[in-house]
Image: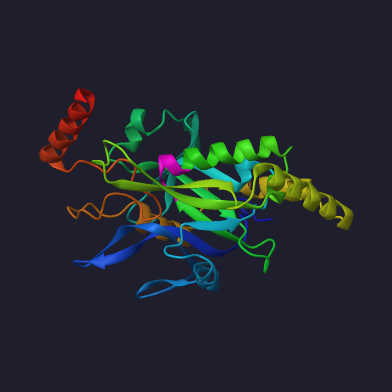
């Protein structure tokens, strides 16, 4: 195994709730209110749709707001990795990744281990270059039982909700997360900071029409069949854990370029440039003095009510 290279789950497609569009010569993220499942190939018009996208839309009326999924690993933290991440906007390279206690930062002398005070208290993160960044790997369909689809997000709501659900489902099923038939769901909410307009985040639940008890029963039955066939889930989790730990940064250089395009767009006055295209833009940034005054007025109005 090459040292310094993170070995991550094989990815055969992407899940997003937005896209990158070109406006006035700039490629900017544009939010959406439904899921889109794409391949890893893109052309001038964007990412090409995966066949799974059309298949799921046939089974849904209207917009695609739920996706039936399973997980590769029993350990919740292997399925969802979330860190504070800072990328170089020019090169797309990750320069600092931390968990709120410690961080790994790329410097002239190599990778340094440093304290991580979180973005709000970090001088290195000034200017909004550091964000919470989550990567969720899921299985869709049964064509490739080790090939996953990845959902990337810088949304606090999505990261917090998915982390909680994964740990809860793992606990109630007796650590059988990889055997549970579950469903990604898109939910909407309004906040003062979103000026009461709808923002969207990703949640996880049991599949429509099923109960939690029936879902857990199905997981135990699948676990028994896997053990009888010799499937070693503990060894798979261990292999994934070792692979993630083999590199300082999870994203490769070519992946980082796409990440910076979606989540770290160039500064612009465009109203579309309010957050990443894969999440709901939890807190749209105020633009100049007028934006700050409008945000403060909204907060005072909320307190008055």
Q: Is residue 217 or residue 278 the one in the foreground?
A: 217
Q: Is 168 situated above or below 281?
A: above
Horizontal and vertical percent position of residue 20: 34, 63
Specify the farthest residue to the front.
Answer: 209
Horizontal and vertical percent position of residue 193: 27, 37
Horizontal and vertical percent position of residue 124: 34, 36
Specify the farthest residue to the top.
Answer: 304
74 horizontally vs 96: left or right: right
Horizontal and vertical percent position of residue 205: 57, 46
- Is residue 103 in the magenta section? no
Residue range in magenta is 153-158
Q: Is residue 18 or residue 22 the one in the foreground?
A: 18
The residue positioned 13% from the left and 34% from the top of the image is 293
Q: Is residue 75 or residue 201 the one in the foreground?
A: 201
In the rendered image, which quarter contains the N terminus?
bottom right
135 horizontally vs 78: left or right: left
């Amino acid at each position: 195994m090459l040292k310094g290279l993170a070995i991550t789950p094989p990815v055969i497609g992407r899940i997003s709730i937005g896209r990158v569009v070109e406006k006035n010569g700039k490629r900017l993220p544009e939010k959406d209110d439904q899921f889109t499942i794409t391949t890893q190939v893109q052309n001038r018009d964007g990412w090409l749709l995966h066949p799974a996208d059309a298949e799921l839309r046939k089974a849904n009326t209207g917009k695609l707001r739920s996706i039936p999924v399973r997980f590769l690993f029993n350990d919740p933290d292997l399925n969802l990795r979330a860190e504070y991440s800072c990328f170089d906007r020019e090169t797309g390279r990750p320069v600092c990744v931390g968990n709120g206690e410690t961080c790994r930062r790329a410097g002239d002398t190599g990778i340094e281990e440093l304290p991580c005070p979180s973005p709000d208290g970090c001088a290195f993160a000034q200017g909004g270059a550091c964000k919470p960044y989550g990567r969720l790997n899921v299985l869709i369909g049964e064509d490739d039982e080790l090939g996953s689809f990845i959902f990337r997000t810088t949304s606090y709501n999505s990261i917090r909700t998915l982390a909680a659900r994964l740990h809860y489902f793992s606990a109630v099923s007796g650590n059988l997360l990889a055997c549970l038939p579950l469903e990604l769901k898109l939910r909407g909410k309004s906040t003062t900071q979103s000026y009461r307009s709808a923002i969207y985040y990703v949640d996880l639940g049991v599949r429509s029409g099923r109960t939690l008890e029936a879902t857990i029963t199905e997981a135990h039955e699948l676990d028994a069949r896997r053990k009888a066939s010799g499937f070693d889930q503990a060894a798979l989790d261990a292999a994934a854990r070792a692979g993630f730990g083999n590199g300082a940064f999870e994203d490769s250089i070519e992946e980082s370029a796409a990440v910076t395009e979606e989540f770290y767009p160039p500064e612009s006055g465009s109203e579309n440039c309010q957050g990443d295209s894969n999440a709901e833009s939890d807190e749209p940034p105020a633009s100049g003095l007028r934006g700050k005054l409008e945000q403060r007025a909204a907060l005072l109005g909320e307190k008055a009510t």
